[in-house]
Image (cartoon, rainbow, N blue to C red):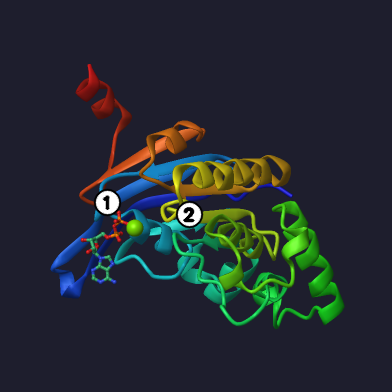
Amino acid sequence: MSGAQVVVANVTKAFDGGRVTALRDVSLDVAPGELVALTGPSGSGKSTLLNLIGSLDEPDSGTITVDGLRLEVIDAIAYRAETVGFVFQFHHLIPTISALDNVQVPMLGRGRDRAARERTSRELLAEVGLAGRADAVPGTLSGGERQRVALARALANDPRLLLADEPTGALDSETGAQVLSLLQRLRAERGMTVLLVTNDDDVAATADRTLRLRDGRVIPDAALRSASA
Ligand SMILES: Nc1ncnc2c1ncn2[C@@H]1O[C@H](COP(=O)(O)OP(=O)(O)O)[C@@H](O)[C@H]1O
Ligand SMILES: [Mg+2]
């Protein structure tokens, strides 16, 4: 399975009836299997961009194309379930059910019986090093373990595109580094495309490429070079 290609063309997005412009004429192109780090100050539009690419929200103007299909014309629910995996800063696991059941949530309603779902869920938990914690509820797991369960859940439907919004932002640096190296390994094994929002320069340095946002715009590399010259 290969990663998705993502093309964002001239995307603009405002909130609050136009009073807050989150993205201004943003264009970018992510190759299949590429890991792109998205950095920028708080409020620069990183989450908004990720949400638009994940079809959690729609641009005001411009287009987003994934594997040649414009998001505005495809079924957003199917796209989110089949093509995309999400990981957020806070794990958003369901607190009352086990790790095994949490990982299965994205598989529900997709025509797989319970035994097949459980088998996949156990395999995914093993992939993230948590085979022994399948029955644990989130509250009994450490922060890093919870993020690993969230990562396993994001992979439940074998996504071609992983969207991770500051996935290590709530972890101490050592635990964050472990979660990130896990993410890197999973990408290498699965070949998926990854868009990783981070404010950690060390994290960004491990990506294939870094895109910087400021005030809702992508800062061109040339501007970065002249700024640091
Ligand atoms: N749902 C929303 N309603 C109103 N304003 C929003 C909403 N989402 C984001 N914004 C605003 O858009 C700008 C970009 O936000 P965001 O994409 O969350 O930035 P980042 O993730 O880089 O911190 C900010 O000014 C933020 O306040
Ligand atoms: Mg954000």
Q: Residue furthest front?
A: 140
What is the x, y in percent for residue 91?
51, 65
User: In front here: 164 or 220?
Assistant: 164
Residue 25: assigned label: 1
The amino acid type, in three-letter code, at marker 1 is Asp
The amino acid type, in three-letter code, at marker 2 is Pro
Using the rendered view, name the quadrant where residue 16 is placed.
Answer: bottom left
From the viewer's perspective, tell me whether residue 58 is left or right of residue 168. Answer: left
Looking at the image, in which quadrant does ligand 2 appear? bottom left
Residue drawn at x 70%, y 73% is: 104
Residue drawn at x 38%, y 40% is: 200
Q: Residue furthest top?
A: 229
From this view, report whether residue 179 is shown above or below residue 21.
above
Label 1 – label 2 distance at C-alpha: 26 Å
Residue 167: assigned label: 2
From the viewer's perspective, tell me whether residue 86 is left or right of residue 24. Answer: right
What is the x, y in percent for residue 126?
77, 56
Mark 1 neighbour density, 10 Å: few (under 14) some (14–19) many (20 or more): some
